[in-house]
Image (cartoon, grey):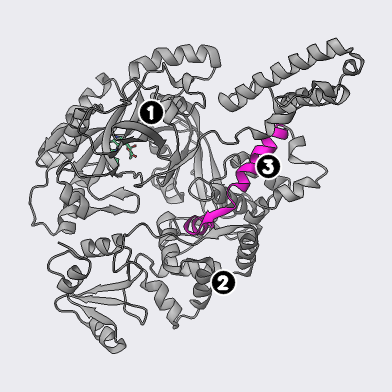
Amino acid sequence: MSDALFNLDREDARARHAALVKEIRRHDEAYYTHDAPIVSDAEYDELRKQLEVLETQYPELVTESSPTQTVGAAPSSGFKKVRHAVPMLSLANAFSEEDVNDFLDKIRRFLGLPEGEPIELVGEPKIDGLSCSLRYEHGKLVQAATRGDGAEGEDITANVKTILDIPHTLNPGAPDILEVRGEIFMNRKKFMSWNAEQAAITKKPFANPRNAAAGSVRQLDASKTAGRPLHFFGYALGEVSEKFATSQEEIRLSLAAWGIPETPYKLCKNTAEIMAFYESLLQRRADLDYEIDGVVYKVNRLDWQERLGFVSRSPRWAVAHKFPAEQAVTRLEAISIQVGRTGALTPVARLEPITVGGVVVSNATLHNEDEIRRKDIRVGDYVVIQRAGDVIPQIVSVVLEKRSKNPGPEYKFPNTCPICGSHAIREEGEAIRRCTGGLVCPAQAVERLKHFVSRLAFDIEGLGSKIIEQFWEEDLVRSPADIFTLEERNKTSLTPIRAKEGWGDLSEKNLFAAINSRRTVPFNRFIYALGIRQVGEATAKKLASVYGTLENLKSALIAAQDETGEARADLLAIEDIGPSVAADLIGFFAEDHNLQQLERLESLLTIQPYEAPKTGDSPVAGKTVVFTGTLTKLTRAEAKAGAERLGAKVAGSVSKKTDYVIAGEDAGSKLKKAQELGVTILTEDDWLALIGAP
Ligand code: IVH
């Protein structure tokens, strides 16, 4: 601290105070509003300290608006959260004509359509931007939100209102509530000149128009969004108060009539027409004003769309036919091994950096040891790499003509873990070699922590990979529960986080605010966060819906260790949980250290019981049903999806807990078991009547 501060006379002190306040305000604005601090946290903290000292010397300078009195109120995360009334989904991908035919065949099977029955599709360009939901009430734009994790996004209304394409008021005729889903994107040609100007000021050009659009909409100061060459295309609906169309095409025409910009499209009657549309867009790709990375096909009939519904995160009635990946040739400099949270050893190619499709690539995945052998990849080789969308770049092949006359030796995959030195073994029939170090392997522990805080798990902003690694090294966070005791421990620490390099009062405060905002967590996210092998987001949701609370899940999975017991049968009866997933689940709950970790987490967190999706007053919500035999009016897949949509659980086998068995023609052993156990048995028609199907 400078001595000069102590010798100021009153007038000088006042002037110095005003200057410090101005300076701190400027930095607050840079940090909070523009997401772009101009000084380090340490420099900023030094300014605040000076201000505090000055105010202690001259208390009359303290006013209500002084930064010493106000900074506590600054927001830690810029945007309000918005819960989507209807989830925002993503799309399944197709990469070939065969995939497209598969997509159509699946639809036919699901709907029980005869082979060869035409399915009319709307083809639209797949815009490479960021998805956005616009909510209009009585024709007025009231809210705009990002997709976020699909269930909850961020409120970007102020930013979106600066995009000239997007009407604030719709033309007459729209339903009272209308949510339009679409893509915000940056004009491709204008991006080039805008990005060059931008780079001259910030020294940080965007890699492509998509990133530029995303960065622009996430400006905390909406006036910064204004004036950027942003546009919008609408392509789907969220919540609507009344039905106004019977086909995808009618949706598009109505949206256009109300003033929403729409992309060109084509109504296709068969695979030949679909492929022709795909080819024509592929040809025109470079001339379009917007980036596209494929074509989206949507079933035109809305009654079919409704029946088809969704699987996991994507609709069954749409698919994205992606354009071929972009490729480039570069040199393989080294192969290193990464260890994941489940101990998998993954070879990673370190490449001479090269631009592929607008993005600089310096790493690519090599999948596993067989892949390296099959492609005979050697360090020093020139390799063809490709990247498609957000997928991790891959090595396609070696350019043998460019191989040196004295090539390096064949790559030898390690059989010990490069991090902890434990044996790395490959189970029979598995492609992946795994470290057997378990708890002693730091790489696994660190990766588990990264997974725990990741977006679809606890989603703790500010606890990125680098920080997790740092906290691990410094012994601050070694297990998930440690994250939630960090603040308490930090209070008495001799080297608090704010004193570490790159940290300051503000960033420390923001970190704890982010952690504390996640002390209440939905049960399904909690299960997913545990990082149990093979338990992804969909399985976590399923488990949460079946078991409801952590208490139930725990006792059921401990009981399921008994191979012949009822708990094991119940677990296996859950649709989509086979013996292998069950074994991983049971294995997790059989470990003492996992149970201890769960206990610690339970004492630090509030885990919200699973909230079933809204199912209205469906008579089958919460019931467990089993379909058996041949159904005649519905296909099995449609029956199952329909039951689930109404909140029922569909099981694969009959037990005392089954509420209804729906027996089709030629039902056999399951019907017999239901009779023995006295479970209510319904015919297909009884079932349809019960659920009020038309
Ligand atoms: S339909 C339920 N149509 O692609 C319908 N999506 O990879 C879901 N996208 O999240 C989306 N162009 O952000 C649809 N013509 C189009 C699209 C499109 C771009 C984006 C959208 C979606 C992502 C899925």
Label 1: few (<14), some or many (≥20) within 10 Å?
some
User: Pointer 1: what residue?
Assistant: 328
Q: Is mark 3 within 8 Å of ligand 1?
A: no
Residue 270, position in %: x, y? 10, 42
In the displayed structure image, the side of residue 282 where residue 463 appears, left or right: right
| Spatial separation of the CA atoms under disc 3 and disc 1 | 35 Å
Q: Which stretch is magenta?
A: 502-531
Point out residue 681 in the picture as x, y percentages from the top left corner.
Answer: 23, 80
Compared with 313, 550 (above or below) is below
> What residue sits right under mark 3 in the picture?
470
Residue under label 2: 590
Three-letter residue code for mark 2: Ala
Asked whether the viewer can see residue 151, the reply is: yes
Mark 3, other Cα within 10 Å: few <14 / some 14–19 / many ≥20:
few
Residue 630 in sight from this viewpoint:
no
> On the rendered image, what quadrant is the N terminus found in?
top right
